[in-house]
Image (spheres, grey):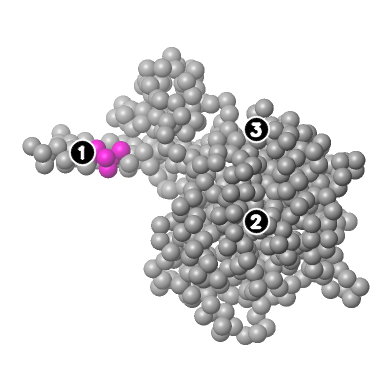
Amino acid sequence: MRRLLSTTEAPSPVAETAFAADRAWRLNPQVALRDEAFGALAYHYGNRRLVFLKSRTLVTLVSALADYPSASEAIAACVPERSHAAYERALARLAASGVIDAC
Amino acid sequence: MPAETAEAAEIAEIAETVEAPLSLKDRFTHGLDAPICLTWELTYACNLACVHCLSSSGRRDPAELTADEARRVVDELVDMKVFYVNLGGGEPMLRPDFFDLVGYAVERRVGVKFSTNGTRLTAERARRLAALDYLDVQVSIDGATAATNDVVRGEGSFAAARMAMDNLAAAGFGPFKISVVVTRQNVEELDALDALAASYGAQLRLTRLRPSGRGIDSWDALHPTASQQRRLYHWLLERPGVLTGDSFFHLSALGEPLDGLNLCGAGRVVCLIDPVGDVYACPFVIDRQFLAGNVREAGGFAGVWRSSELFRSLREPQSAGACASCGSFDACRGGCMAAKFFTGLPLDGPDPECVHGHGETALASLDTGSRPHAAIGHSKVGVDGTPVPVPTPVRFRSPART
Amino acid sequence: MLAEDQDTQDIEDVSDEDVDELLVEEVSIDGMCGVY
């Protein structure tokens, strides 16, 4: 049965889901997203990770992800072009932490 | 344009979209609009009498929050989007509405972890707990053997805790936590504690002994020595899977920082709600000086969290005071305010267990009257009116009494 | 040629970290002091 998981090892930076920008992604249903003035806090009830999203743009992007057929298109719609690569890397980190998962 | 300029421009561009490029630690130091998690002591009633009890528990307070008031607190935590709550006491399973309240919280996706001495964690209750989602259990012991543990927690308490662990395992609960307060006596048993946790597939959690509650009087005899602290630090560095609740951040002055935020979260990202609804900065400072308000006030818990004068002042930059000239201050932040307060040390100075020995020096130069006296609190008292910190034999309730 | 490659490598490494730290940071939920 599901419950708050406790890992017996420290959380590792190994990717939980390999990120591919041409796939569709969404906020993981096991994650609670709480808005803050500076961005948002994301708490994953499964792996107990607390992740800090440090820009409102990133929060907007993550919240809108599921509306787009691919992460690339979501980024194109939500993020200034010069920052596309950086936000793609941010999404990859969020995928590694389990904050977002593939649809 | 040249590679360096393109990168600099990209960083500047990102910075424009980022409202506040401060670290998580900086943000937390200034406080948040709601706690991330918090401790909630459900009752001062307890059937044990541990010598170091941080809440001086034993006797139930007649003004305990009612079941309805407790549900209103959960409603507030839901509104504030608090991610999870740590239930404790006293012994939380002594609350008649314990299961109702836990169910009420997890149904609303407020994660619950509760700390228990295990004496009421029967096989049947373990099965009930195993069926719940969003739930963690933390069983408290203070030694890897009854010999070490029971001196602090009472004769029979280790056996009762082990039975609770066996019940959780048999019920298929999954990984639970074993929580140990590190003492001079149990530092020698760290490896054994690690093995004990591993034998259950459980997670070991070590936390710092603070001189709080009944700990005021037992701290001198129980707190680890400087050399033991150094050993503990290195032991923890080698075992990132052992939880600490960030309670040893004062040891980060020894070198590489331990896992965690390495800062005091009290009043900033965490706090305590006590059994009568009083809100304190953290469970280790149950004292008027650190009382922020009460959930029964008109603004409820949210009002206290957001408007209390105490919390406002904690969320301001704290003075380094006597530690300002020390190169380690950034790493240790002057340590734990509870440790300082209850040993009579000024809050803007070294922690009593400062790894460089500055705390010991400060303690030695204190007037004898500086240390706060241990209040009776809710301790059970003997016929002469003094607390009964002497461990009393305990029994594990038989299944028939669930 | 080798020196140029190393320089490029260094810039990319540093900027990835800078940029990433500006957007995402993580901590363990058990990693804040003042809780049971």
> Residue flagged by tag 2: what amino acid is it?
Ala
* Circle 1: residue type: Gln
Question: Would residue C15 be counted in the magenta stretch?
Answer: yes
Instruction: Look at the numbered discs 2 and 3 and tell me whether their residues touch, using CB distance below 8 Å.
Output: no
**Quadrant housing residue C18:** top left
Q: Which residue is mark 2?
A: B144
The answer to whether tags 3 and 1 share a subunit is no
Give the dominant element type of the magenta stretch: helix, strand or loop. Answer: helix
Give residue B183's position: percent from left, percent from top: 62, 64
**Which mark identifies residue C9?**
1
Near-viewer residue (B336 or B145): B145
Name the residue that disc number 3 marks.
A3
Q: Residue at x 44, y 26 (%)?
A: A17
Instruction: Report whether B110 appears left or right of B395.
Output: left
The percent coordinates of residue B63 (x first, y second) are 86, 55
Comparing labels 3 and 1, the label whose residue is closer to the camera: 3
Q: Is residue A3 above or below residue B402?
A: above
